[in-house]
Amino acid sequence: MRKLLALALMLCLLAPAALAEEDYTVDMMYIPYGSVNTGVSVHDPSVVAADGTYYIFGSHMAAAKSTNLRSWTAIANGYRADNPVWGDLFAEGLHVFDYAGARNSLIPTDDGGTHVWAPDVIWNPVMGKWMMYYCTSSTFNASNLCFALSDSVEGPYEWQGALVCSGFEEGQLAEAGVLDVVDEASAKRYLTLAGGYDYKSWPNAIDPSVFFDAEGRLWMVYGSWSGGIFLLELDPATGLVIHPEEDKARRVDPYFGKHLMGGNHQSMEGPYILWDAEAGYYYLFVSYGALTARGGYQIRVFRSETPDGEYVDMAGAQPNRRGGHAAYGLKLSGNYLLPSFRNAYMATGHNSALIDRDGKRYIVCHTRYDNGTEYHQPLVRQYALNAEGWPCVLPYATAGEDIAPLAAEEIPGRYFVVNQGMDISGDIPALFILYLREDGTLGGENVSGTWTREEGKIFLRLTLGEKAFSGVMAQMEDDGEEPVTVFSAVGGNESLWGVKYED
């Protein structure tokens, strides 16, 4: 009997002390609140770098610049003829808003206003010009893609003309330029039997973004809700659309281009394609949900080895026109509450992305807050690719951190963890506590699993029950400028973030 008691005592002494000391209570009272005040409010920010300065261009003719991607100075804002970036947009004789200004429609949703939304700016070395692509819009689908040119990234940008229209009715086919591409009989495909625009099958011509592919070809991706996301090739010598030959098998339409995904008026908008030469993939970012604070706005990503697709998620799939799109696309960012946040970040969506000269990758979006208002400001976070080449977003606003391998002793500890999940709602995912133990196991309330790392690399792997996540680790600052160790891992199209504070 004494031998058994002695053996039991020895086993207790040999058991890891951490197991008895683990606290799964989510208590953030000891963590100081912080905030990131960017100084501007720019909606749908599209980022570009020029001569050591970063610029964001957004809806409602707003723009700002920064040298650190954190503090911004406004350079333009508002529908004014003296807007220094948009130049001659309201000049007499240009007829910019003839099609998509304040106008009537068979679908009575016209608010009587003029809208300039979601610009994207890119340097064109062929023309030796800065190009801006944007849209004018008056109803939920009566829109017009336009472009402008400038010698300076800050403008003024001179309007060059209209490219593609949507929301047209039977009597507007010539006005919309459709009959310049297809004959009148073929144009019937874009209309309902009542002669209105078939918006569930064809795109809303807004939210353009433009990119050069690995071969130097120029492309424009665009679309919002309605018929989904579409892609057209552009002529780099002129900036104009190269309308393709029809190819029904590949979902290529001569007027609107290739249908990449979505449709049936599912929530999908703000497409942005980024070519990552190191990864060997084109990444297609889109936003799901409605853009209000409680609308479930969020960022999803798909990827392809070619610029015109097919773009697929971590399961090798993509949403179709039939619906049920919530299950598709790696969800990178939605609503979330982390230590040092006074209010949860809400509706983190409509993003652009940037690979800087030093190789750092950034994702740029706008965020609202759980504070009862719809105020928004830009949010810039760094991201890294995991071992399989999928983006993993670091949880806090960037402060110039370097993502470098951590020493083995820096990783174990108590983490505040949030799983972004897959839902499209105004809910804020609950934080939970997860211990990364020194022996490679995980501890948590009703949670078990393992974790591993690769020596000398930033990569981290976790298994929580039957779910496997592959991600990265880094050290950065939270919103209160407190040093933290973080991980960002993805699996099954979900994103898992963890934050550890030093004792």
Image: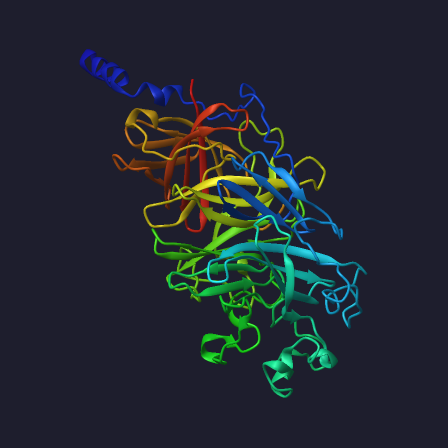
- In what quadrant of the picture does the N terminus appear? top left
Give the residue furthest to the left.
Answer: 3
Residue drawn at point x = 50 percent, y = 39 percent: 381
From this viewpoint, is residue 427 visible?
no
Q: Quadrant of residue 66?
A: top right
Q: Is residue 342 above or below residue 106?
A: above
Q: Quadrant of residue 179?
A: bottom right
Give percent across and percent down for residue 209: 54, 58
Give the residue furthest to the top.
Answer: 2
Q: Is residue 83 above or below residue 93?
A: above
Residue drawn at point x = 45 percent, y = 75 percent: 250
Give percent across and percent down for residue 395: 49, 36
Residue drawn at point x = 63 percent, y = 56 percent: 157
In the shown orientation, is residue 62 left or right of residue 476? right
Coloration of the structure image: rainbow
From this viewpoint, is residue 24 visible?
yes
In the shown orientation, is residue 265 left or right of residue 481? right
Q: Nearer the viewer, residue 100 or 157?
A: 157
Q: Nearer the viewer, residue 58 or 444?
A: 58
Give percent across and percent down for residue 237: 50, 67
- In what quadrant of the picture does the C terminus appear? top left
Give percent across and percent down for residue 153: 56, 50
